[in-house]
Amino acid sequence: MKGYEVKRISTRHQVMSSMNGRILFITQWKYDDALVQTYTLPYIRIITNITSSYPYLITMKEGSKSTTIEKKNGVIVIQMPSGKRLLYMGWLLNFLKLYIISGRKNIRLIHAWCTTAGTIGALLKLLDKRKTLVIDSFEPHAEAMVENESWRSGGIKFKSLFYMEKLEAAIADHLIFAAPGMENYILKKYKTQVTNFYVKPACTDLDMFSDKYMKDEALMAKYCLQDKIVCVYAGKFGGIYLEDETFAFIQSCDKYWGDDRFRFLLLSNVSEEYIREKISKFSIRQSVVIKLFIPHSEVPSYMGLADFAICPVKPVESKKYCSPIKNGEYWAMGLPIVITPNISVDSDLIRNNHAGAILEGFTDADYKNAIKQVDSILQGKSRREVYTLIRPLAEKYRNFGIAENVYKKIYGQIS
């Protein structure tokens, strides 16, 4: 197991120095979303430092009103209406706007994040083959939606997106995978052999997530966490994330440590009604679950209150090729992680480095076994000692230098 490594496979499709230095970055997220703030903007800064380019960033906004354009932190942000009320017509209108914008700005280079935004990039390239297309964080999405029972395998949504993923793999000049092995998936599922690919995980701001936010005394007192063992989860439920199984695990944690020693810190915008339903279903005392929804800039301070974390991603086949963002942040904060099997390379890294526990199944025995593994890491060690054991995983496998090396390979020839 080598973890992540930057790998250049082919020298073809090099980005030419004659390009005008304008790059259209495409996302399907809102500007204030953490996926833009922590997963997109840092990468754009790296790319613009390499290329001295003019970045145009496409993001979404609520409603179906007009597109807005403004400059934010050196990036020209174009916020397009989500168009959800107009369904496919709204999507088509957005695409036509992008086609016009890219033509007016003479944009020859498109960098799209994930397969859904990659669809737009692929169609723009089909209309103008002079454009260079880079698809970042390319991973299965259509099959993932079927595996988590959100879509039907024979449905039009699945068939449409699966076809577009196949097109993206064939037409992109550069593919950046979130985890190793995606080229084998593409060959098996899309019957396409790709050679122009790289591997880059979800990288983490190691300065933002660090020991300076560990066990903030004021917050510890505010939430009465002194002498408690705290598990943190920053994320959602449903879709690709386990629901009942997560709360069954929390119930087992409370029983294992006993004497009111355990707390579950949930950093999420899930509704209070949802939490009440789950704690009632699993007979969890209300004081055990502390649910907070906070700005991402404050997440390190709250994550630092924890002793370990959970990554409740459903262990379905397509999750081999993902890269859970929060795992890098947990590691950077020095937190052992309880994770399901075969999630990217993360599960193996945790297993091989004794950095948490693999939840092999969803029985009481499985929960207890995982908890015992975490307890063995925590017992007899200070929080600082555990941090020293776990932090190197983030420094080695989630540092932004990995992304910079990939982008230099792709964009290094832009003058």
Image (cartoon, rainbow, N blue to C red):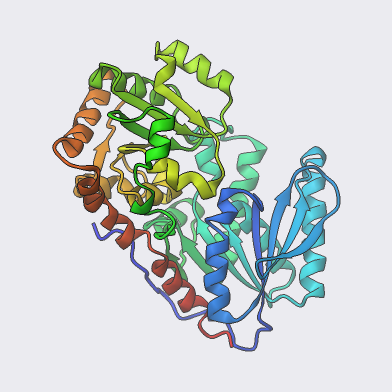
The percent position of residue 273, horizontal first and vertical second, equals 58, 18
Report which quarter residue 218 is drawn in: top left
Horizontal side of residue 47 vs 90, given as left or right = left
Report which quarter residue 118 is drawn in: bottom right
Front residue of 328 and 28: 328
Q: Please say whether residue 65 is visible from this viewpoint.
A: yes
Horizontal side of residue 100 vs 164, given as left or right = right
At 50% across and 33% down in the image, what residue appears?
148
The percent position of residue 411, horizontal first and vertical second, equals 53, 78
Q: Quadrant of the N terminus?
A: bottom left
Looking at the image, which residue sits at the far left? 380
Looking at the image, which residue sits at the far right? 66
The percent position of residue 212, horizontal first and vertical second, equals 36, 53
The percent position of residue 384, horizontal first and vertical second, equals 24, 48
Report which quarter residue 295 is drawn in: top right
Q: Quadrant of the C terminus?
A: bottom right
At 16% across and 35% down in the image, what residue appears?
379
Front residue of 126 and 411: 411
Numbered-mark total: 0
At 56% across and 49% down in the image, what residue appears?
34
Q: Please say whether residue 313 is visible from this viewpoint.
A: no
Horizontal side of residue 2 vs 163, given as left or right = left
Above or below residue 128? Residue 346 is above
